[in-house]
Protein backbone atom coordinates (compact mmCIF):
# COMPACT_ATOMS: atom_id res chain seq x y z
CA UNK A 1 0.00 0.00 0.00
CA UNK A 2 1.34 3.43 -0.84
CA UNK A 3 1.53 6.40 1.46
CA UNK A 4 -1.48 8.06 -0.20
CA UNK A 5 -3.73 5.25 0.95
CA UNK A 6 -2.66 5.46 4.60
CA UNK A 7 -2.73 9.27 4.67
CA UNK A 8 -6.27 9.30 3.22
CA UNK A 9 -5.64 12.61 1.49
CA UNK A 10 -4.72 14.26 4.79
CA UNK A 11 -7.82 12.95 6.63
CA UNK A 12 -6.14 9.86 8.14
CA UNK A 13 -6.65 11.02 11.74
CA UNK A 14 -10.41 11.17 11.14
CA UNK A 15 -10.93 8.22 8.78
CA UNK A 16 -8.89 5.46 10.49
CA UNK A 17 -10.25 5.97 14.03
CA UNK A 18 -13.76 5.57 12.58
CA UNK A 19 -12.92 2.22 11.00
CA UNK A 20 -10.99 1.13 14.10
CA UNK A 21 -13.99 2.09 16.26
CA UNK A 22 -16.30 0.10 13.98
CA UNK A 23 -14.09 -2.99 14.29
CA UNK A 24 -14.02 -2.60 18.08
CA UNK A 25 -17.84 -2.35 18.22
CA UNK A 26 -18.28 -5.38 15.94
CA UNK A 27 -15.78 -7.45 17.97
CA UNK A 28 -17.28 -6.33 21.30
CA UNK A 29 -20.76 -7.35 20.18
CA UNK A 30 -19.68 -10.88 19.23
CA UNK A 31 -17.56 -11.27 22.38
CA UNK A 32 -20.22 -9.97 24.77
CA UNK A 33 -23.03 -12.00 23.15
CA UNK A 34 -20.97 -15.19 23.43
CA UNK A 35 -20.05 -14.42 27.02
CA UNK A 36 -23.70 -13.66 27.84
CA UNK A 37 -24.74 -17.03 26.45
CA UNK A 38 -22.02 -18.99 28.26
CA UNK A 39 -22.84 -17.26 31.56
CA UNK A 40 -26.54 -18.03 31.06
CA UNK A 41 -25.61 -21.65 30.41
CA UNK A 42 -23.59 -21.74 33.67
CA UNK A 43 -26.47 -20.17 35.58
CA UNK A 44 -28.87 -22.72 34.08
CA UNK A 45 -26.49 -25.52 35.07
CA UNK A 46 -26.39 -24.20 38.63
CA UNK A 47 -30.22 -24.01 38.66
CA UNK A 48 -30.39 -27.61 37.39
CA UNK A 49 -28.03 -28.77 40.16
CA UNK A 50 -30.12 -26.94 42.79
CA UNK A 51 -33.31 -28.49 41.40
CA UNK A 52 -31.62 -31.91 41.56
CA UNK A 53 -30.68 -31.30 45.21
CA UNK A 54 -34.24 -30.41 46.09
CA UNK A 55 -35.84 -33.44 44.41
CA UNK B 1 -49.38 -22.68 6.87
CA UNK B 2 -48.95 -20.38 9.87
CA UNK B 3 -47.40 -23.15 11.98
CA UNK B 4 -43.87 -21.80 11.56
CA UNK B 5 -45.08 -18.40 12.75
CA UNK B 6 -46.70 -19.76 15.90
CA UNK B 7 -43.55 -21.74 16.63
CA UNK B 8 -41.67 -18.43 16.97
CA UNK B 9 -43.47 -17.95 20.30
CA UNK B 10 -41.89 -21.12 21.68
CA UNK B 11 -38.64 -20.49 23.63
CA UNK B 12 -37.02 -23.91 22.91
CA UNK B 13 -37.79 -23.55 19.18
CA UNK B 14 -36.34 -20.01 19.08
CA UNK B 15 -33.27 -21.15 21.06
CA UNK B 16 -32.51 -23.87 18.50
CA UNK B 17 -33.42 -21.72 15.48
CA UNK B 18 -31.07 -18.96 16.70
CA UNK B 19 -28.23 -21.50 16.95
CA UNK B 20 -28.79 -22.51 13.32
CA UNK B 21 -29.19 -18.96 11.97
CA UNK B 22 -26.32 -17.21 13.83
CA UNK B 23 -23.34 -18.69 11.89
CA UNK B 24 -25.04 -18.10 8.51
CA UNK B 25 -25.90 -14.51 9.34
CA UNK B 26 -22.44 -13.77 10.75
CA UNK B 27 -20.77 -15.49 7.77
CA UNK B 28 -22.83 -13.40 5.34
CA UNK B 29 -22.00 -10.28 7.36
CA UNK B 30 -18.25 -11.05 7.18
CA UNK B 31 -18.45 -11.39 3.39
CA UNK B 32 -20.46 -8.19 2.86
CA UNK B 33 -18.40 -6.12 5.31
CA UNK B 34 -15.14 -7.49 3.87
CA UNK B 35 -16.19 -6.57 0.33
CA UNK B 36 -17.52 -3.18 1.46
CA UNK B 37 -14.29 -2.34 3.31
CA UNK B 38 -11.99 -3.23 0.40
CA UNK B 39 -14.17 -1.57 -2.23
CA UNK B 40 -14.92 1.47 -0.08
CA UNK B 41 -11.39 2.08 1.18
CA UNK B 42 -9.34 1.06 -1.86
CA UNK B 43 -11.37 1.28 -5.06
CA UNK B 44 -14.03 3.97 -4.51
CA UNK B 45 -12.81 7.34 -5.80
CA UNK B 46 -12.44 10.28 -3.40
CA UNK B 47 -15.37 12.70 -3.23
CA UNK B 48 -14.92 15.90 -5.26
CA UNK B 49 -15.74 18.08 -2.23
CA UNK B 50 -14.90 15.99 0.86
CA UNK B 51 -11.92 14.11 -0.53
CA UNK B 52 -11.10 10.86 1.29
CA UNK B 53 -12.97 11.98 4.44
CA UNK B 54 -16.19 10.88 2.73
CA UNK B 55 -15.10 7.23 3.29
CA UNK B 56 -16.31 7.59 6.88
CA UNK B 57 -19.80 7.13 5.36
CA UNK B 58 -19.03 3.40 5.01
CA UNK B 59 -19.17 2.95 8.79
CA UNK B 60 -21.22 5.99 9.82
CA UNK B 61 -24.33 5.42 7.67
CA UNK B 62 -24.65 1.66 8.41
CA UNK B 63 -24.23 2.21 12.16
CA UNK B 64 -26.80 5.04 12.12
CA UNK B 65 -29.27 2.86 10.14
CA UNK B 66 -28.70 0.02 12.54
CA UNK B 67 -29.26 2.24 15.57
CA UNK B 68 -32.72 3.14 14.19
CA UNK B 69 -33.61 -0.37 12.99
CA UNK B 70 -32.59 -1.98 16.29
CA UNK B 71 -34.68 0.54 18.24
CA UNK B 72 -37.71 -0.06 16.00
CA UNK B 73 -37.32 -3.82 16.40
CA UNK B 74 -36.97 -3.39 20.17
CA UNK B 75 -40.19 -1.35 20.33
CA UNK B 76 -42.14 -3.78 18.09
CA UNK B 77 -40.89 -6.83 20.04
CA UNK B 78 -41.65 -5.09 23.34
CA UNK B 79 -45.13 -4.25 22.02
CA UNK B 80 -45.71 -7.90 21.07
CA UNK B 81 -44.65 -8.94 24.56
CA UNK B 82 -46.82 -6.30 26.16
CA UNK B 83 -50.00 -6.74 24.11
CA UNK B 84 -50.04 -10.49 23.38
CA UNK B 85 -47.98 -11.47 26.44
CA UNK B 86 -45.57 -13.45 24.30
CA UNK B 87 -42.44 -13.94 26.40
CA UNK B 88 -40.12 -14.16 23.41
CA UNK B 89 -41.10 -10.59 22.50
CA UNK B 90 -39.55 -9.27 25.71
CA UNK B 91 -36.50 -11.52 25.25
CA UNK B 92 -35.92 -10.12 21.72
CA UNK B 93 -36.33 -6.56 23.01
CA UNK B 94 -33.84 -7.21 25.84
CA UNK B 95 -31.34 -8.78 23.44
CA UNK B 96 -31.61 -5.96 20.86
CA UNK B 97 -31.05 -3.11 23.34
CA UNK B 98 -27.28 -3.37 24.04
CA UNK B 99 -26.51 -4.06 20.36
CA UNK B 100 -28.52 -1.03 19.24
CA UNK B 101 -26.93 1.14 21.94
CA UNK B 102 -23.41 0.17 20.86
CA UNK B 103 -24.15 1.11 17.25
CA UNK B 104 -25.70 4.40 18.36
CA UNK B 105 -22.44 5.21 20.16
CA UNK B 106 -20.54 4.28 16.98
CA UNK B 107 -22.82 6.48 14.83
CA UNK B 108 -22.27 9.43 17.19
CA UNK B 109 -18.48 8.92 17.36
CA UNK B 110 -18.00 8.50 13.60
CA UNK B 111 -20.34 11.42 12.92
CA UNK B 112 -18.34 13.55 15.31
CA UNK B 113 -15.04 12.57 13.64
CA UNK B 114 -16.56 13.30 10.23
CA UNK B 115 -17.96 16.62 11.43
CA UNK B 116 -14.60 18.00 12.55
CA UNK B 117 -13.00 18.32 9.08
CA UNK B 118 -16.29 19.11 7.29
CA UNK B 119 -18.06 21.50 9.69
CA UNK B 120 -15.07 22.59 11.77
CA UNK B 121 -16.49 21.12 14.98
CA UNK B 122 -16.85 17.73 16.64
CA UNK B 123 -20.29 18.52 17.96
CA UNK B 124 -23.14 20.94 17.24
CA UNK B 125 -26.60 20.98 18.79
CA UNK B 126 -28.02 20.21 15.38
CA UNK B 127 -31.45 18.47 15.08
CA UNK B 128 -29.99 15.25 13.62
CA UNK B 129 -27.15 15.00 16.13
CA UNK B 130 -29.34 15.92 19.09
CA UNK B 131 -32.11 13.46 18.18
CA UNK B 132 -29.51 10.69 17.73
CA UNK B 133 -28.11 11.52 21.18
CA UNK B 134 -31.65 11.28 22.58
CA UNK B 135 -31.86 7.82 20.97
CA UNK B 136 -28.78 6.79 22.97
CA UNK B 137 -30.42 8.08 26.17
CA UNK B 138 -33.56 6.11 25.29
CA UNK B 139 -31.53 2.92 24.86
CA UNK B 140 -29.82 3.50 28.22
CA UNK B 141 -33.20 4.30 29.80
CA UNK B 142 -34.82 1.12 28.45
CA UNK B 143 -31.92 -1.07 29.66
CA UNK B 144 -31.81 0.60 33.08
CA UNK B 145 -35.57 0.38 33.53
CA UNK B 146 -35.59 -3.34 32.70
CA UNK B 147 -32.99 -4.09 35.36
CA UNK B 148 -34.42 -1.68 37.95
CA UNK B 149 -37.27 -4.00 39.00
CA UNK B 150 -36.89 -7.05 41.19
CA UNK B 151 -39.75 -8.71 39.34
CA UNK B 152 -38.45 -9.33 35.78
CA UNK B 153 -42.01 -9.28 34.38
CA UNK B 154 -42.59 -5.74 35.64
CA UNK B 155 -39.19 -4.68 34.32
CA UNK B 156 -40.04 -6.07 30.89
CA UNK B 157 -43.38 -4.27 30.80
CA UNK B 158 -41.92 -0.94 31.93
CA UNK B 159 -39.07 -1.20 29.41
CA UNK B 160 -41.50 -2.10 26.61
CA UNK B 161 -43.65 0.94 27.44
CA UNK B 162 -40.66 3.28 27.35
CA UNK B 163 -39.44 1.72 24.09
CA UNK B 164 -42.88 2.21 22.49
CA UNK B 165 -43.15 5.82 23.66
CA UNK B 166 -39.58 6.52 22.52
CA UNK B 167 -40.19 5.15 19.02
CA UNK B 168 -41.56 8.60 18.14
CA UNK B 169 -37.90 9.67 18.04
CA UNK B 170 -37.17 7.38 15.06
CA UNK B 171 -39.08 9.39 12.40
CA UNK B 172 -37.82 12.58 14.07
CA UNK B 173 -34.21 11.44 13.49
CA UNK B 174 -34.97 10.34 9.93
CA UNK B 175 -36.77 13.51 8.85
CA UNK B 176 -34.83 15.99 11.00
CA UNK B 177 -32.69 17.05 8.03
CA UNK B 178 -35.86 17.91 6.08
CA UNK B 179 -37.92 19.46 8.86
CA UNK B 180 -35.26 21.81 10.26
CA UNK B 181 -32.19 23.67 9.07
CA UNK B 182 -29.38 21.22 9.63
CA UNK B 183 -25.63 21.02 9.19
CA UNK B 184 -26.13 17.35 8.41
CA UNK B 185 -26.42 16.35 4.76
CA UNK B 186 -29.68 14.91 3.39
CA UNK B 187 -30.31 11.24 2.68
CA UNK B 188 -27.71 9.67 0.38
CA UNK B 189 -29.81 6.61 -0.37
CA UNK B 190 -33.54 7.35 -0.38
CA UNK B 191 -36.30 4.85 -1.04
CA UNK B 192 -38.04 6.65 -3.88
CA UNK B 193 -35.30 8.84 -5.30
CA UNK B 194 -32.13 8.23 -7.29
CA UNK B 195 -29.11 7.84 -5.00
CA UNK B 196 -26.98 10.99 -4.81
CA UNK B 197 -23.71 9.11 -5.41
CA UNK B 198 -22.27 7.14 -8.34
CA UNK B 199 -22.25 3.34 -8.42
CA UNK B 200 -18.52 3.09 -7.61
CA UNK B 201 -19.23 4.76 -4.25
CA UNK B 202 -22.73 3.34 -3.77
CA UNK B 203 -22.06 -0.42 -4.06
CA UNK B 204 -19.62 -0.59 -1.13
CA UNK B 205 -22.11 1.45 0.92
CA UNK B 206 -24.97 -0.93 0.12
CA UNK B 207 -22.71 -3.88 0.87
CA UNK B 208 -21.76 -2.39 4.26
CA UNK B 209 -25.44 -1.65 5.01
CA UNK B 210 -26.39 -5.26 4.25
CA UNK B 211 -23.36 -6.53 6.17
CA UNK B 212 -24.24 -4.52 9.28
CA UNK B 213 -27.87 -5.72 9.11
CA UNK B 214 -26.76 -9.37 8.80
CA UNK B 215 -24.30 -8.81 11.63
CA UNK B 216 -27.10 -7.43 13.78
CA UNK B 217 -29.22 -10.50 13.00
CA UNK B 218 -26.35 -12.85 13.87
CA UNK B 219 -25.42 -11.14 17.13
CA UNK B 220 -29.10 -10.83 18.06
CA UNK B 221 -29.41 -14.62 17.65
CA UNK B 222 -26.35 -15.19 19.88
CA UNK B 223 -27.58 -12.80 22.57
CA UNK B 224 -31.16 -14.06 22.31
CA UNK B 225 -29.96 -17.59 23.15
CA UNK B 226 -28.48 -16.30 26.41
CA UNK B 227 -31.59 -14.24 27.12
CA UNK B 228 -33.91 -17.24 26.58
CA UNK B 229 -31.74 -19.45 28.81
CA UNK B 230 -31.76 -16.83 31.56
CA UNK B 231 -35.52 -16.52 31.46
CA UNK B 232 -36.29 -20.24 31.14
CA UNK B 233 -33.64 -21.73 33.40
CA UNK B 234 -36.25 -23.49 35.57
CA UNK B 235 -37.77 -25.27 32.54
CA UNK B 236 -37.16 -28.92 31.82
CA UNK B 237 -36.00 -28.27 28.25
CA UNK B 238 -33.19 -26.01 29.59
CA UNK B 239 -32.07 -28.86 31.84
CA UNK B 240 -31.88 -31.02 28.71
CA UNK B 241 -29.78 -28.32 27.01
CA UNK B 242 -27.47 -28.12 30.05
CA UNK B 243 -27.11 -31.89 30.13
CA UNK B 244 -26.28 -31.96 26.41
CA UNK B 245 -23.67 -29.17 26.61
Image (cartoon, coloured by chain):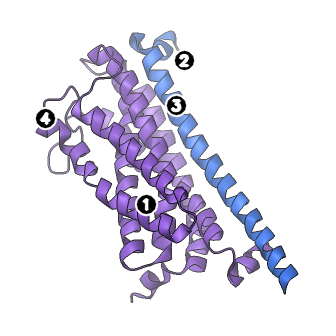
Chain colours: A blue, B purple
Residue topped by disc 4: B180
Q: Are marks 1 and 4 on the same chain?
A: yes
Q: Are marks 2 and 4 on the same chain?
A: no
Image quadrant holding the N terminus of chain B, namely: bottom left
| Closer mark to the observer between disc 3 and disc 2 | 3
- In this view, B95 is above or below B196: below
Image quarter of residue B108: top left
Q: Residue at x 36, y 41 (%)?
A: B64
Kindly report the distance in space between the C-alpha atoms of the residues bearing marks 4 and 3. Answer: 30 Å
Alpha-carbon span between mark 3 and mark 1: 29 Å
What residue would you read off at disc 3? A21
Q: Residue at x 44, y 88 (%)?
A: B3
Contact (Cβ within 8 Å) of mark 1 with mark 4? no
Nearer the camera: disc 2 or disc 1: 1
Question: Which residue is under mark 1?
Answer: B159
Q: Is residue B99 left or right of residue B174?
A: right
Q: Nearer the viewer, mark 3 or mark 1?
A: 1
Amino acid sequence: MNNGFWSMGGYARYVWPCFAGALVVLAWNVWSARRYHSRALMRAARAAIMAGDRS
Amino acid sequence: MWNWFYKLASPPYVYRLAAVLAPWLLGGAALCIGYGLVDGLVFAPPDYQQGDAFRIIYVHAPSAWLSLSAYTLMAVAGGIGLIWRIKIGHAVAAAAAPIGASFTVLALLTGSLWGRPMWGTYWAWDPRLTSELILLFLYVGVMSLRSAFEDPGRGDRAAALLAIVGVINVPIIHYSVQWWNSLHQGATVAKFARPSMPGSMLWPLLSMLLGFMLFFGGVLCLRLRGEVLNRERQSSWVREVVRAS
